[in-house]
């Protein structure tokens, strides 16, 4: 049977009455949560933000109010971190909104989604990796500030003027492998989350862009 | 039209309802951005096909090579002479085995869209569309022939 003969059947489908949806039914549909990938990613991002605020806020208040305000510097450090995280969340949300392009042609929608998703993944890996040295440096500065090196008799202190656990070289020696490890873990994690989706989109785009001479 | 797209891309009622809901949400979100630069039907097809094709959703059950239960419900009461009925079922089963892009092309072809309109919706140039359409027709011819000789 030829495809053209199916046109009659298709037209019969058209003339068959489609199930009517009332205004209330349509409103109920619109109130439900979207199951799209981008909507789920946006919900996860909101969840992350709420979790960060829920953990950072009591910590900030704790260091402001306790110890007669002597450790308020730690609170300010957390506030600075929150400001950096705000930029991080804003950027991620902007990328997710850019992925919602359902009104474009199918081809440009696929191109846009692939391009933006790759940017999103790159940003996620880079930001997640950079946060480790930033937080480590913050922690080291706070320790150096609040716990000045006490005179010690050990050899390390005698040579460098710092206990071994406060010396920058010790922290750098720990930081490099930890940062490298976190980088590869992030890479593996995002590939697990989004790798298959990107490959599927690329396959679809390749099929659309197939040129015939 | 939305129901037709759902029937083409989903094989279970639950998946069809999910996809229909998603399309309604996307239409609602995109409506404020519709400026009338393209035809309303073009805009509608773009959103429906973008939602059906490019969204990440759980793997839908793929039909078996000859799945004779895939005729849409409204047509089940319509009868055709015996041999045509079987061929129709085989053609539907063959369409179900096409890729997502090929299904979109078939749907627009069956909707009597011109190649210019298809280009507006899909973003593939008309020459490539013509070649793809011919290849799809050939593919469907082969699949239905295989099914016929396999069954007989």
Image: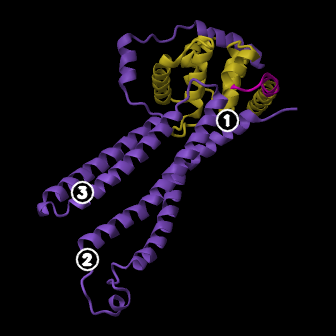
Chain colours: A purple, B yellow
Left or right position of A93 against B48: left
Marks 3, 2 in one chain: yes
Q: Nearer the viewer, mark 2 or mark 1?
A: 2
Q: In the drawing, what numbered circle is on residue A148?
A: 2
**Mark 2 or mark 3, which is nearer the start of the sequence?**
3
Compared with A149, A60 (above or below) is: above
At label 2, counting other C-alpha atoms closer than 10 Å, the crowd grade (few under 14, some 14-19, many 20 or more) is few
SS category of the residue bearing label 2: loop
Numbered range of the magenta stretch: B123-132
Main secondary structure of the magenta stretch: helix
Regarding mark 3 in the picture, which secondary structure is present there? helix
Q: Quadrant of the N terminus of chain A?
A: top right
Disc 1, SS: loop
**Residue A74 drawn above or below residue A208:** below
Kindly identify which residue carries mark 1. Answer: B65
The residue beneath circle 3 is: A75
Q: Which residue is drawn at 78% across and 30% down?
A: B139
Q: Position of residue B83 (x, y in %)?
A: 73, 18
Q: Residue furthest right?
A: A213
Q: Position of residue A178 (x, y in %)?
A: 45, 69
């Amino acid at each position: 049977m030829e495809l053209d003969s199916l046109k009659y059947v298709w037209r019969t489908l058209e003339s068959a009455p489609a199930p009517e949806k009332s205004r209330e039914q349509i409103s109920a549909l619109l109130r439900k949560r979207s199951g799209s990938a981008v909507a789920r990613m946006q919900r996860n991002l909101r969840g992350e933000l709420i979790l960060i605020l829920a953990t950072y806020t009591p910590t900030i208040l704790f260091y402001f109010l306790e110890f007669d305000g002597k450790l308020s510097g730690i609170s300010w450090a957390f506030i600075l971190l929150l400001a950096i995280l705000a930029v991080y969340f804003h950027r991620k949300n902007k990328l997710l909104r850019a992925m919602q392009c359902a009104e474009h042609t199918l081809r440009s929608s696929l191109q846009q989604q692939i391009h933006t998703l790759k940017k999103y993944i790159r940003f996620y890996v880079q930001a997640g990796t950079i946060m480790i040295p930033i937080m480590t440096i913050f922690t080291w500065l706070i320790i150096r500030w609040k716990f000045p090196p006490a005179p010690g008799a050990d050899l390390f202190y005698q040579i460098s003027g710092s206990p071994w656990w406060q010396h920058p070289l010790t922290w750098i020696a720990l930081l490099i492998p930890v940062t490298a490890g976190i980088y590869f873990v992030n890479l593996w994690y995002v590939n697990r989350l989004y790798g298959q989706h990107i490959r599927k989109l690329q396959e679809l785009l390749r099929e659309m862009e197939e040129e015939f001479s | 039209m939305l129901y037709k797209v759902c029937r083409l891309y989903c094989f279970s009622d639950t998946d069809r309802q999910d996809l229909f809901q998603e399309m309604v949400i996307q239409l609602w979100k995109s409506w404020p951005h519709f400026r009338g630069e393209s035809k309303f039907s073009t805009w509608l097809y773009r959103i429906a096909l973008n939602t059906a094709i490019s969204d990440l959703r759980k793997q839908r059950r793929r039909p078996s090579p000859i799945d004779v239960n895939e005729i849409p419900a409204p047509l089940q009461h319509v009868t055709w002479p015996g041999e045509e009925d079987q061929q129709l079922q085989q053609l539907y089963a063959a369409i179900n085995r096409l890729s997502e892009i090929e299904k979109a092309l078939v749907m627009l072809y069956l909707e009597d869209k011109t190649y210019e309109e298809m280009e507006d919706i899909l973003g593939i140039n008309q020459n490539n569309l013509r070649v793809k359409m011919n290849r799809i027709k050939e593919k469907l011819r082969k699949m239905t022939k295989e099914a016929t000789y396999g069954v007989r």
